[in-house]
Amino acid sequence: MKGVILAGGKGTRLYPLTKHVPKPMLSLLGKPVLEYTINLLKEYGVTDIMITLEYLPETVMTYFGNGEKWGVSIQYFIEEEPLGTAGSLSHLAHFLTEPFIVMSGDSITDLNLTEVMDFHRNHHGIMTMVTKEVENPFHYGVVICDGEGHVEKVIEKPKRHEVMSDRINTGIYILEPRALSYIQEGHKVDFSLDVIPTLLAASESIFAYYTNPYWVDIGQVSHYKKAHWDAMRRQQSDYVMIEDNVTIGEEVILIPPIYIAAHTEIQERAVVGPYAVVGPNCRIGTDSTVQYSILLGQNDVQKESHLHSVMIHCGDHARSTIKKSGEDGSPFTSSDDRQTLSRGEPLFSKGQMIKPLFQITSEFLMRLGQAFASLYTDGATMYIACDGDRDSFHMKELVAHSLQLQGYEIKDLHSLSVPCLQHMVMTTQATFGLHVSTSQHEVKIEYYQGNGELLESSLEWQLEQAFWANERLYSSNRVGYKEQALFDREGYVDSLVYSFHIPKILSVNAFIVVSCPSYMRDVLLQICRDLRVECIHVAPSINDKEMSDMIAKQKAFLGINISSNGDEFVLFDETGRKLTEMEMLSLYVLSECMVKNNEEIPLPVHAPSTFDQVIKHFRCTSLRTKKEKRDIIRARAPIQFQTDALYALCQLLELIAVKNSFLSELLADLPVVHMLQEHIECPWEVQGKVLRKLSEEAFDKELIDGIKIFHDDGSWTLILPDSYAPILTIYSQATNQQIAEQSLSYFIEKIKEYQRV
């Protein structure tokens, strides 16, 4: 069997350690990380090796040459531009004429490759991927399998609500040569994002080999540090490795485990260890201590200095000096605090960032601005707006300022709804739009791309990488200007009203009660004038009972309470009854089928199956999507019933006019839905395990969002993780209330049981 080692990554999260050294060549106890992978392949008889390179390739090629020193034959493929984790394989068909193993050059493992090879041969799949259980899967690809080990889905770099398993893709694969035909030559191709979904779509068999060997990816500072300590622990308990040409002074105390590289001087009475790595050409001063720390070389620790739990490198300096005060002359890379924040609390989720107000500091915003600057060119145009809250206004100004310092041209729309912001971004070809809102001591920042859609997940990941990679705060060469922008109210209103059957709406002389923020009032009233709708506008502070009483007293057609952002709403029928979420969705379905005549109707995954039956009755097709706003927008359009309250209002008025029926009458003709919903606590650290076990047990399931399990009697249960709290939401739909209750109780008990295991 031949081997391919992927060694082209830049190591962004390890910067500045990787500024002059490619990630696979970082030292681990005196040897490059890549050397450990080569030695492992050699141990199991894989001696014909191809290494793919892109970043600083000459460093690898100069060190390893043709591999003769290690008893292997090494060839190299250099990517002229990044081709992803799999793109380079399309160029290696001449080399990969038999089953081959793919490994990463920046991970350390003691995996038994013979066992993996035997597993692959026995299962006859096109691909085998090695998986491992971890407690924190957020920086890996989560693997979802059935009970027999068939891979069903891989979710790369999952957010909290996407952690459907505790088993991750280690980046170790065995593939058949015919898998290369699924990789497009000359394009950037990723195993998890491209190859695996393509193979699954083609009904090819991919198997997951689950094992629990030692494995660590050094792609983060904390993991790189851990790899050192693990390597020491795996040696004898009194591990002390001292290379050649090391000078040790009198009364020096060495506490195992420690590693000291060549050409290092340790002066009198210094204490080194436990868990200390001292790189080449270092000097440890008199009466100094180095404990639980890594010096990567060329470091001068002055006398009476005390280092604990740090990692230090010399950066662009010939040497770095660590002074007694703890100040040093080089970039100081301990940075576990920042990594902990990133790892435990991702910056973005579903195109949004929701953080406590106290976390949004000026430094935070500067780093965020720098991250955006890595994605968009200098001089990019951005619209910015906020809801009507005072805190939102001040936060908007701070965000705008941080982006101006990165050269962005800011167009300030002041207080504006999210749908109106989307309209401006799309119609003016802006680079992106940003909306700020605050509530209950939290700030929510939503990012919209030029097409009006929320920031896609791949860009979220890139932004997070850029955010945590920046070592220093800096500004652009120019400061972008900020100007007050005028909202195109006429254009937005026309885009709404001309989407509907205006004559029908005009003919009914509708009367409605609307609660919405004051900044939306002018837009609302213009829509009502254009459609000849009489409207009573009430303050957002009105409660449900007051709204119901007003609707009944005024004999209104309907009442609607619009959120502060303008994208969500609560609906009341003509009797003043507050409608449920599913009742509002059912009105949307009726309108789409009976009035709009759309062939394909997007539905969130938790909507009842009766909606599919209604859609099929009208010879339309339902398209199930994730529950979240980003996915609903992507399935249809940025301005639509489920994401724009004013659009939904117009669509409801059209439905009433065309069908000549009030909302309660329309709802009365729909089948009865028996659906229950319950929340159950499930700690983050066991959530992946719980969902994996539920998925493996389910015979008939759907993995669009969460796990939707179908039962023999036609009922189903949906288990959805939450983005911001350690809870699972369970939806149970059945043909009657009793079955729904039984199913709900069963899965609640199952979740509790799997938490205990």
Image: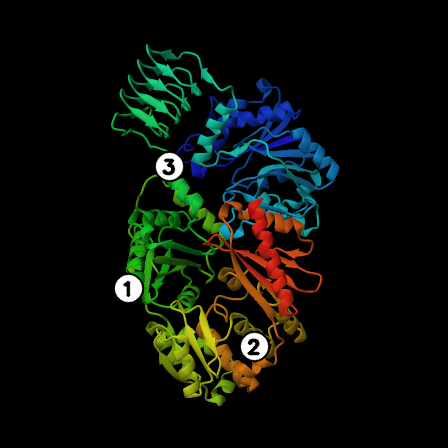
Are there few (<14), some (14-19), or many (20+) residues within 10 Å of tag 3? some
Of 565 and 134, nearer the camera is: 134
Snapshot quadrant of residue 534? bottom left
Q: Residue furthest top?
A: 250
- Mark 1 secondary-structure assignment: helix
Of 394 and 551, nearer the camera is: 551
| Residue on which the image places disc 1 | 390
Q: Report the amino acid beneath label 2.
A: Ser
Snapshot quadrant of residue 246? top left
Q: Is residue 612 left or right of residue 308?
A: right
Rendered residue at 40%/55% (across/down): 354
Snapshot quadrant of residue 437? bottom left
| Residue on which the image places disc 3 | 335
* N-term mark: 1 or 3: 3
Q: Report the amino acid beneath label 1.
A: Arg
Q: Disc 2 to disc 3, how far (Cα)? A: 54 Å
Q: Are marks 1 and 3 in contact (CB under 8 Å)?
A: no
Q: Is residue 164 left or right of residue 547?
A: right
Q: Disc 1 to disc 3, how far (Cα)? A: 35 Å
Of 502 and 206, nearer the camera is: 206
| Residue on which the image places disc 2 | 591
Q: Disc 1 to disc 2, how far (Cα)? A: 38 Å
